[in-house]
Amino acid sequence: MLHVENLTKRYNGTLAVDRLNMDIPEGEIYGFVGANGAGKTTTMRIIAGLLAPSSGKVFIGGIDVFKEPLEVKKHIGYMPDFFGVYDDLKVYEYMDFYAGLYGISKQKSRGLTDSLLELVRLTNKKDAYVDTLSRGMKQRLCLARSLIHDPEFLILDEPASGLDPRARVEMTEILKELRSLGKTILISSHILHELSELCTSIGIIDAGKLIASGSVQDILEKMSHANQVKIRVSSKEEEAVKILMEIPGIGSISSVVGVIDVNMEGGDEACVRVLKTLVERDIPVVSFQPVESSLETVFMQLTKGEEQ
Amino acid sequence: MKINPILQKDIKTKLRGWRSVILICSYVTLLIFILLIYFVGNDLIYSYTMPSFNPRVAIGGYNLLITFQFALLYLAVPAIIATSISSERERQTLDLMLVTKTPAREIIAGKILVSIAHILLLLIASMPVVGVVFFFGGIGFPDLLKLIFFYILTSLFVASSGVFFSTIFKRNIVSIITTYIFLGLMTFGPFLGFFAYSLLNQMTFSPTYRSIALSLFPSPVFGFLSFYFSGTSHYDIFGSYYGHGLFSSIAYEFEVLIASETGLLRYMQPWIVNGIFSVLFSLLLILLSSAALNPVRRKK
Ligand SMILES: Nc1ncnc2c1ncn2[C@@H]1O[C@H](COP(=O)(O)OP(=O)(O)O)[C@@H](O)[C@H]1O
Ligand SMILES: [Mg+2]
C-alpha cells in the first residue's frame, strides 16, 4: 500500500528525515514511533502530499504522490498532530464541508456522516457547535473527517496525544474497529505502548533515521540478547550483588530492599548461568524473574545515547 | 451546478443569526443618511433657483453614493480576503483542506468568491437607495448594471491581490498590511506618476485619451471615472458643468477626450480598459497563489 524510498527532508540545514525507507503492505497497522522531534510529523506530511521532500519517492497504492497528488488524495485519510476547527460550524456541517471538498454529494454525505459519527461515538453531538466539543471529541471528529471519503490508507499523526487516559482508551477502541474494517493505517506516537497492542508492525525513527522496522515480534527478538532480570533474595543481598558483579556480561545492577535488578547480555543461557552461580554460592534466591522486554525498553535501548 | 464548498460554508455560517441582517441594515441606513444630508445641504443652496427637486442634485447624490460604495468595496474586500488563507494557516485548518482532492486553485477561487459574494450582497441591498437617485436623476438601468459589473471586476482585482498576499505571507497582519499598501500603490501610483509627468512637462503637455489610458489603466479609480455623471448631456440648461463638483467635471473632460479619439479606443471607456486589466491581472495572481499554495511545490 505504502512504499517510501530514500525519503529525505532538509529544513535549511537541519536534516529532519534522512534516507528513510518504508513499506506497508495492505491491511497492516504500522506504528511509527520516535521521540519528539524525531521526524514523524515531517515524514507523514510528506506522505500525505502536504510537504515536498528534498529527495526521495513515495507511492501509495502504486500511485506516485508527487506526480499525481490529486489522484492519491482520494485514497488517503490524514489526521494531523495539531489541527483546528471552524468554531462557527455544527458537527454535521463540519462533516458536510469536508465531504464537499471531496466532491461528495449532499445526500450521500448525510448518510456517511451518520455512520461515521456513530463509529467515533459522536452521534449525540451532531447538532452541537464544533467549538463546544472536548478535546477528545474534537480528535474523534477529526478522525471521522479523515474517513469521509472512505480512504483505504490512513495517516494518523499522534491521534491520542494530549488525551486523558479514558479518551485514549476510546480512541484505541475506535482504531481497532478501523483495523477490523480492513484499513491500512500508519499511526505515530512518541509513546510505544500506546501502539503495541494495536499494531502489526512497528518502525522506530530516531533523528530522522528509521533505526528498526518489522513486526512487533521481530523488533522484540532483535533485542532478545539484552535481558533484564529481577532477583529477589531473602537475605545476603550485598553478598549477592558482589557475586553478580564478578560475573562477566553483567551490565548495570541496582538493588532495593531485597530486590536486585540486573541488566545483562546474552539470552537464556546467560540467565541459567547467573542463577546457577547464585545458588552454588548459597544465596537464598526467592525468585528469579526475567523481565519480558517490553517495547518500551526496546525503544529506550534503541534510542539511548541520543537522549543526552 | 456544484457550488464551491468554501462559498457554501461561508454562506451558511455568515447568514446564520442576526449579525449579517444587522450589518446590511446599518449599511443601507448609512447610505440613506449620507444621501439625506447631501440633499438637505444642496436643496438649501439651490432652493432659490429651483424650489422643487433638482435633478442635478440627484446626479450629484448618485456620484456621491457610488463613490462611497466604491471606497467601501476597496476597504472591505481586503479586510475579508487578506486573512483568508493566512487565517486558515494560523487556525491550523489549511492542511485539512489541502489534503482533500480539491485543488489549490479551487480553494483560492472559493475564497475570492466569498469576498465577491459579500460585496454583491451589500450592493444588492443598497440598490433601492441608489435606485431612488436613478429614478430622480434620469440615470439609466443599463448604467446601473454596468456599474455593478465594474464593482465585481474591481472586487475580483482587490480580492485576488488579497488572496495572493494571504497565501505568501504566513501571518494575518503582514498579509493585511501588504495588501493595503499594494492596492494603494496600484490605485494611486499611476495617478501620481501621471501628475508628476505632467508637472515636469508643463509646457508641452497636452494629454490625449490614449496617453491617459496607457498610464492610468491599472488603477480602478481610473476605470471608475466612467461612472461619474457629468449631467451635461442631459441637464446643461441648468448651467455649466463646473457647478457640479470635481467628479462631474473630470467626467466631462473625459467625455470630451474620448470623443476626440479615433478607432477602437473611442469605444474603450476607462472602465473597459481597467476592467480588462483587472481580469487579466487577477488571473495571473490566482495562478501564482495556487502555485504558492500547492503543497508539493510549496517551499517549507
Ligand atoms: N517547518 C520547519 N522548519 C524547520 N525545522 C522544522 C520544521 N518542522 C520540523 N522541523 C524540524 O524537523 C525535525 C523533525 O520534526 P517533526 O517531524 O515535527 O518531529 P516529530 O513529529 O517526530 O516530533 C525537528 O528537529 C524539527 O525541529
Ligand atoms: Mg509530531
Image (cartoon, helix red, strand yellow):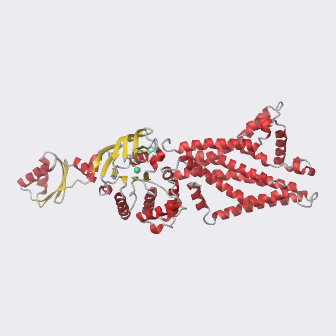
Q: Is residue A141 above or below residue A78?
A: below
Q: Is residue A302 above or below residue A287?
A: above
In the rendered image, the quadrant that contains the N terminus of chain B is bottom right
Tell which of B76 and A123 is nearer to you: A123
Q: Is residue B5 above or below residue B249?
A: below
Tell which of B136 and B249 is nearer to you: B136
Image label count: 0
Q: Position of residue B226 (x, y in %)?
A: 78, 46
Q: Residue at x 29, y 57 (%)?
A: A197
Which residue lies most toward the bottom here?
A: A124
Q: Position of residue B57 (x, y in %)?
A: 85, 55
Q: Which quadrant would residue A290 be assigned to in this image?
A: bottom left
Q: Position of residue A44 (x, y in %)?
A: 41, 48
Q: Residue at x 22, y 49 (%)?
A: A221
Left/right placement of residue B118 relative to residue B92 reads right
Visible residue check, residue B168? no
Q: Position of residue A130 (x, y in %)?
A: 50, 63
Visible residue check, residue B220? yes
